[in-house]
Amino acid sequence: MRILVIGGAGYIGSHVARAFLDRGYAVTVFDNFQTGLRENLFNDAAFVHGDIMRPEQLRAAMAEGFDGCVHLAALKAAGQSMLKPEIYAEANISGTINILNQASAAGISRIIFSSSAAVYGSPQYLPIDEDHPKEPENFYGFTKLEIERILDWYDRLKGIRYAAIRYFNAAGYDVRGRIKGLELNPENLLPIVMETAAGIRPKLTIFGDDYPTRDGSCIRDYVHVSDLAEAHVSAFEYILKHDSSMTVNLGSQTGVTVFEMVERARAITGRSVSAEVSGRRAGDPSELVASSAKARELLGWVPKYSDVDTLISSTWKMYEKFATL
Ligand code: UFG
């Protein structure tokens, strides 16, 4: 079976490419290196340097013939999406339309799409299941929801079967150390904690300690990127077997506070992680936790690496090489 992984040189994409390779698939990675990294390419996968905004480059790549395609090529900074919606509209929405039209013309009828918990907005109840109201609070989340709707129409009108996978907080690195590239300019909690532990940045800012949670800091559902990656393969096999589309949450179903994450990071790295509490960051809900019952039921998905210690230790393995302390 042949799979095209679009955005396969990125942080999540490289783990997804590795998961398909590990399960015996022939993989081609398509990436423009805007945020992806050359060092994330694998010797046992083919590579095409291309951009989803260039339909002719997609057409040429897809002409090789694939049984399915994974689409992870997108912009993902929620805050930036509120300042520059036009670039999110183009890259995320127009880019996906290019992929769908070229895939459909090339006879590729199975697509796995990286969606996000950002489609839900602030939780109205917890844990968040797939039927929870979708009221995105940033433009990034809106683009993901809009693409899910387009996918649904392409399913009905063009016979494209899709799996839309709504990630909660992706974190961690391949525990076997096979991913070489560190994410550039990380904006997420765990890499920032690791940069602080390694001395790359002087301190971590904790955004708020006055939330209605057990220690006042925000609760998130962190899921290991290798567990996410594994679910992409299972989702592809699901749509192959059932010839039907699906939408699932992927989270660990466990809430962890910012303070808890920092404390475990101090214990595991043996480093002082200097942290200072500031005011709340705009748009942060106090608690986000997924229900992953549907992924368990439909995909048999059970996270193996999403406990806090494995999330931290697998990330620290990447960062300790750069430690300056
Ligand atoms: N945080 C800090 N300091 C930092 C960075 C983060 O205190 O320097 C806190 C945030 O306030 C939040 C938690 O750590 O409470 C996690 O923040 P992240 O920025 O790592 O992640 P978010 O929960 O904001 O968002 C992430 C992805 C989104 C996705 C969402 C789904 O970045 O794309 O998870 O749950 F939609």
Image: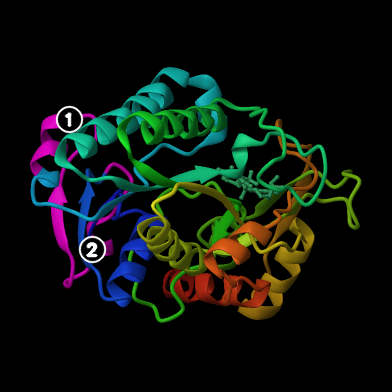
Residue located beneath label 2 in the image? 41
Give the residue type that dot 2 points to: Leu
Q: Quick check: 74 left or right of 146?
A: left
Q: Position of residue 93 (x, y in %)?
A: 39, 27
Asked if the residue under mark 2 is in contact with the one under mark 1, i.e. CB atoms within 8 Å, the reply is no
Of tags 1 and 2, the one toward the viewer is 1
Give the residue type that dot 1 points to: Arg
Residue located beneath label 1 in the image? 54
Disc 2 Cβ-to-ligand 1 distance below 8 Å:
no
User: Going from the N terminus, do you reach mark 1 or mark 2 first?
Assistant: 2
Magenta residues?
34-60
Q: Quick check: 176 left or right of 258?
A: left
> Magenta includes 142?
no
Residue 196 visible at all: no
Circle 1 crowding by C-alpha within 10 Å: few under 14, some 14–19, many from 20:
few
Which residue is nearer to you in this view: 124 or 213? 124
